[in-house]
Each structure stands twice: as structure tokens, then as C-alpha cells.
Amino acid sequence: MPATAPGRASAGASVPLPAVHRFAGDSTPAQFARFVLVGGSANVVYAGLFLVLAPLGDQAANVAGVMASTALANELHRRLTFRAGDRAGWAAAQWAGGGLAVAGLVTSRLTLAALETWTGPAGPLVPVLAVWTVSGVVGLARFAGLRWVLVVRPGPGGRGAAVHTS
């Protein structure tokens, strides 16, 4: 049931709240808000996996966490953030988001190596926070890249151009 503004519903009709309506739309700000929520959720999954796998070492825990959380985030971005489930296949979303995530993985691995060199063993939370910072920066590039691949753009004659569907 959609959220309604107090005192705005009449005779069983519901009036969506403006914020909910804006969040549910396909504007760039609405997509970015959903992107942040999905990315934040994926980072919680990453942190959980990292902490569980930390005894294997920071690098191994990082790679496993990045792989799992990236696959989850790419699929959620395809279905929820950009609503491209009917326009772009699973593989297209994984390639688009995964390619940018590889850059993030390389950056996070270098960050973890530098962090360990500069601070020594700092416990599992410091590396998680460092990787989250890198993820935020890489996330901005992923948003732009995924939006380019998964969003219908006007084609000739004003019709929507097809997106990659492989």
C-alpha cells in the first residue's frame, strides 16, 4: 500500500507522498538515491563476508567480499535502480558493473596493502572502513557507467534506443 500524506486521502483513495513519488521515479536523482541504497546494502554484505573471512587474511576476505557484493549489487541495480530487467540481461549488467568493479578491486587491494604497510595489523574494522571509502569513490563512476549501459536513451526520431541485452 503506498504511503499517503496525512489528511490527504479521501473516500478510500490514496495520494502518494511527494518524496515517495520522486524516489520511485526514473529521474537521475531518483536513480541515484536507489543506487546509494543498493550500494549501501551491498556494502553491508561485503562487511559481513569480510569479517567472517578475515581469518583467511585481508586480501582474501576483500576479494571474496567484493565478488559476492558486486554480483548482488549489479543485479539489484539492473532490476531496481535502473529498472532494466526487461531491457538488459543479467550478463550485460554483470559485465558493465563488473568491469568497473575490477578497477575498484584493484584500488581496494592497493589501499589495503598500503594500509597494512603504514599501520601494521589494525584489526578488521579499519580495512573495512578503508574499502568502503574506496567503494564510495568507485561507486560514483559505476553509477555513471551503469546508467549509460542500462538506461534507455532517445534514439533517432525521439524513440528510445535499445540498450545492450547480451
Image (spheres, grey):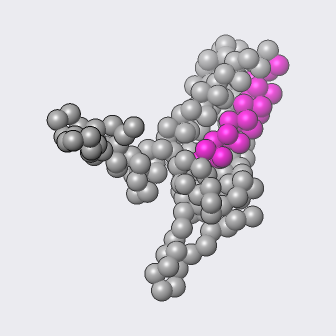
View extreme (left): residue: 7
- Identity of the residue drawn at 35% across and 43% down: 20
Taking the image as drawn, is residue 15 in sight? yes
Depth check, front residue: 135 or 42: 42
> In the image, is residue 94 above or below residue 110?
below
Side of 81 relative to 25 (left or right): right
Q: Position of residue 159 (x, y in %)?
A: 50, 79
Q: Does the magenta-highlighted stretch encompass residue 108?
A: no
Q: Main secondary structure of the magenta part?
A: helix
Q: Does the magenta-highlighted stretch encompass residue 60?
A: yes
Magenta segment range? 56-77
Location of residue 108 by image quarter: top right
Taking the image as drawn, is residue 113 in sight? no
> In the image, is residue 147 above or below residue 133?
below
- Identity of the residue drawn at 53% across and 49% down: 81
Side of 36 relative to 54 (left or right): left
- Identity of the residue drawn at 67% across and 67% down: 164
Quadrant where the C terminus is found in the figure: bottom right
Side of 149 relative to 34 (left or right): right
View extreme (front): residue: 11
Q: Position of residue 85 (x, y in %)?
A: 62, 55
Side of 108 relative to 15 (left or right): right
Location of residue 19 by image quarter: top left
Q: Position of residue 59 (x, y in %)?
A: 77, 28
Q: Position of residue 69 (x, y in %)?
A: 68, 36
> In the image, is residue 88 above or below residue 98?
below
Depth check, front residue: 64 or 155: 155
Depth check, front residue: 1 or 163: 1
Image mark count: 0
